[in-house]
Image (cartoon, rainbow, N blue to C red):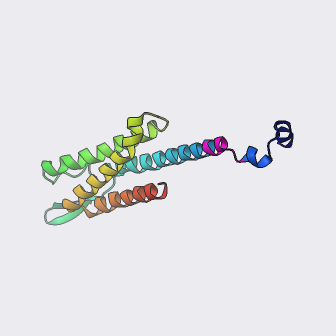
Amino acid sequence: MKAISKFFSVSLDDLLSSDAILTIAEDENKQKENQSRNLVFGLLDSSVAIFLFLPFFGQRVDGVIQEVSLLSLTEIELYVRIPYLFIVFAMIIWGILLLALQNCQSAFWQHSKDKVSLSLSVLGTLIFMVSLQPYAAAFTFVFLLIKALMLIKWQ
C-alpha cells in the first residue's frame, strides 16, 4: 500500500477511505442482510408445516376438547377448516420460495417478498385468533414478532 501511495502521490488515508471502497462495502453488507432476512423469513414461514402434524388445534369430541393436528382436525366446519389449510399451505409455499429465490434480483420480488410474508403471518394470526385456536395463534404471532423485529433492526 505504501508503494502504491508513493507511486501515485496519494496518501494512505485516501487509498483506504475512498468512496468507491465504502460503497462496495455498504452494498456487500446490504446484500448479506438481505440474504439473512430471506433465510430467517423462509425458515419461519416454512416451519408452519408443523401445524399439519403436531397438536396445535382444539376440537370438541363428545364434550371433551382434544388437541389435534391440522390434518386430524375433522370435527370442525368445512368453512373454518379450508382457511386453516389455505393459510398454512400459503405460508409453507411462500417460505420455500423465499429460500429458493434468495439470489433473485427482480425488482418486483425484492419489493414484495417481505410484505407478502408479513401479510401471511398477520392473516394467519388473525384467522387463528378469531376462530379461537390459541396455540396456533400464539405460534404465528411469535413468528410475526420475530419478523417485525428483524425488519426494524435492519432498517
In front here: 106 or 20?
20
Q: Is residue 69 visible?
A: no
Residue 126, picture quadrant: bottom left
Compared with 114, 65 (above or below) is: below
Q: Is residue 107 left or right of residue 5?
A: left
In front here: 51 or 20?
20
Q: Main secondary structure of the magenta part?
A: helix
Residue 147 in percent (x, y) is at 41, 55
Residue 128 in percent (x, y) is at 24, 58
Q: Residue at x 22, y 52 (%)?
A: 73
Q: Which of the image's four quarters has the N terminus?
A: top right
* Span shown in magenta: 17-23
Residue located farthest toward the bottom when viewing the structure as drawn: 64
Residue 65 in percent (x, y) is at 20, 64
Residue 23 in percent (x, y) is at 61, 43
Q: Residue at x 69, y 44 (%)?
A: 18
How many numbered discs, if any? 0
In front here: 48 or 39?
39
Q: Is residue 63 magenta?
A: no
Q: Is residue 46 visible?
A: yes
Q: Residue at x 85, y 36 (%)?
A: 7
Q: Is residue 21 magenta?
A: yes
Q: Is residue 90 left or right of residue 11?
A: left
